[in-house]
Image: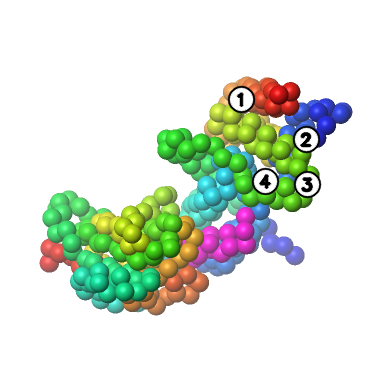
Amino acid sequence: MESSDAELVTRVLHGEVNAYGALVSRYRDRYARYAVHMLGNREDAEEALQDAFTRAYRSLARCEEPERFGAWLFRILVNRCRTSGARRVRRGRTFVHDEAALMRASQEHPAEQTMWREEIDRALGELNADQREAFLLKYVEELGYDEMSEITGVGVSALKMRVMRACDRLRTLLREVHSA
Amino acid sequence: MPEWGGGRTTLEMIVQELQRPVAFDETFERRVMVRVRRLHAERRSRGWVAIASRITHRPGWAAALAASVVAVVTLGLMRSRPDSARQGGAPLEPVQFVLVAPEAHSVAVVGDFNDWGLNDSALVATNHEGVWSVTAPVPAGVHRYAFLVNGKQWVADPSAPRATDDDFGMPSSALVVEDSTR
């Protein structure tokens, strides 16, 4: 039977470091998607997720609800993505596509599907970071507004506004591409 | 491009595409666990002396250049440090790390003195025609370190003693930084 998060956290805190590997394995792919979409490229996303896992390990004793380790880790990841995104803006780096995903898509789907994916990535990159974060949390990760508020530290009203603006902007951008 | 509309809203089509699984390569978990095990070991054995291999001044650029991948650690190149330069009670001493790696696209130094590169703390080396170097203050004492080539390849310093606790799957080297005030 698969160990619960709380059981694994307890084992890690008692010195069984390998138990942490099970937590990494459990949440790696689930959170890779958010990091890649938020940061727009695989390299930065991997780094952000690695940092999140390492920071979580270092602070594990401060995880007050071990049964909710995943939510706690996700909050750390959201912060790491914010930091990484801000640093990228300071460096003046442009938003780039998830090339690996595009490569996979081109192998698995027709060319039109790949173009569609490229357009979505480009449109996501056009959103400001706050709107992109809110949109991804709400619609891709399917979180409720209360949970989003807990993770981001932003009020529910503000989050709803960000989501609404993100949706409007995405619709506009993708319609423009489509009608061009 | 998928049919626009066709009973589904634009938003639904976007979300469906973005909810496709994303997976990192199979080395991701291993890389995370290398960091975690190092942190675990450091917590467990603060004050350890197991890798205490003494490294003395090594001016060997010529010898370094003779090998395809050779690293040299040169200690005490810059003795003029402010008295206040200390970390964790230990005085900081300038250490130059050099790696000859003509094929590399990037080289950084990670070690227990910079939390193994966490929080962007890796020391980024500068390329001089294939000879990568960086000088940084390191607390006096015994350390472990490695070169991170191209962001992923973990390379021990071939010219330095290997750390004895390489059981995390990644090689690392031993470094003794002397206190120049003594």
What amino acid is found at the position of numbered circle 2 in the picture? Met
Q: Are marks 4 and 3 on the same chain?
A: yes
Question: Which residue in the structure is indicated by mark 4?
Answer: A102
- Give the Cα separation between the discs numbered 3 and 1: 32 Å
Same subunit, tags 3 and 1: yes
Element under disc 3: loop
- Near-viewer residue (B181 or A37): A37
Mark 4 and mark 2: Cα distance apart in space: 14 Å
Residue placed at 58% from the left, 26% from the top? A155
A18 and A43: which is toward the camera: A43
In the rendered image, is residue B47 in sight? no
Residue at the (76%, 28%) spot, across then down: B10
Reading the image, the residue beneath label 3 is A109
Subunit under mark 3: A
Residue A48: mark: none
SS class of the residue under badge 4?
helix
For residue B64, which quarter of the picture? bottom left
Q: Are marks 2 and 1 in contact (CB under 8 Å)?
A: no
The answer to whether residue B18 of the structure is visible from this angle is yes
